[in-house]
């Protein structure tokens, strides 16, 4: 994995950590399959534009989703014990920023 891809993954997971509190405080679930399916469709299309195989792209995305959900579950436990991080964006702004970070990763696979 390139250092640029590592950096993008790290940046996106930091945003996921912020977004998780938004979701927690608005009673939104960690997992939203409809959003995942939309992201997957667009991410796979983006990857094929860079010549990345669908298998490689799908595997990367599933591992990234798994890491994101794991992080969010850990953070939900912290929120339940009283930790309250700052929420910087709206739901739609988080989704746009997170989507852009994810799609930027396609060129490094």
Image: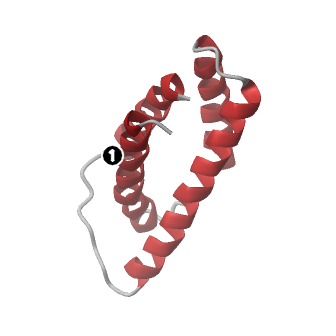
Quarter containing the C terminus: top right
Q: Is residue 53 left or right of residue 87?
A: right
- Asked if residue 85 lies left or right of residue 55, the reply is left
Q: Is residue 105 left or right of residue 11?
A: right
Color scheme of the displayed model: secondary structure
> Vertically, is 24 above or below 60?
below
Front-most of 81 and 74? 74
Picture coordinates of residue 65, whole percent (x, y): 60, 50
Residue 101 spot, x, y in % from top left: 41, 34
Q: Is residue 74 visible?
A: yes
Viewer can see residue 29: no
Residue occupying the point 38% across, 34% down: 4
In depth, the one of 79 and 61 nearer the eye is 61
Q: Which residue is mark 1?
A: 90
Residue 85 coordinates in the image, percent (x, y): 26, 68
- The quadrant in which residue 56 appears is top right
Query: Which secondary structure, mark 1?
Result: loop
Q: Residues within 10 Å of mark 1 (few under 14, many from 20)?
A: few
Residue at 71% of width from left, 23% of height from top? 53
The residue lying at 67 percent from left, 27 percent from top is: 41
Considering depth in this image, is 25 or 71 the residue closer to the camera?
71
């Amino acid at each position: 994995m390139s250092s640029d891809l590592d950096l993008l993954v790290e940046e996106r997971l930091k945003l996921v950590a912020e977004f998780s509190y938004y979701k927690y405080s608005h009673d939104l679930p960690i997992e939203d399959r409809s959003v995942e399916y939309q992201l997957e469709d667009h991410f796979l299309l983006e990857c094929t534009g860079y010549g990345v195989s669908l298998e490689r792209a799908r595997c990367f995305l599933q591992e990234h989703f798994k890491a994101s959900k794991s992080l969010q579950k850990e953070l939900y436990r912290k929120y339940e014990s009283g930790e309250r991080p700052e929420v910087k964006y709206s739901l739609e702004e988080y989704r746009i920023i997170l989507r852009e970070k994810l799609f930027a990763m396609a060129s490094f696979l």
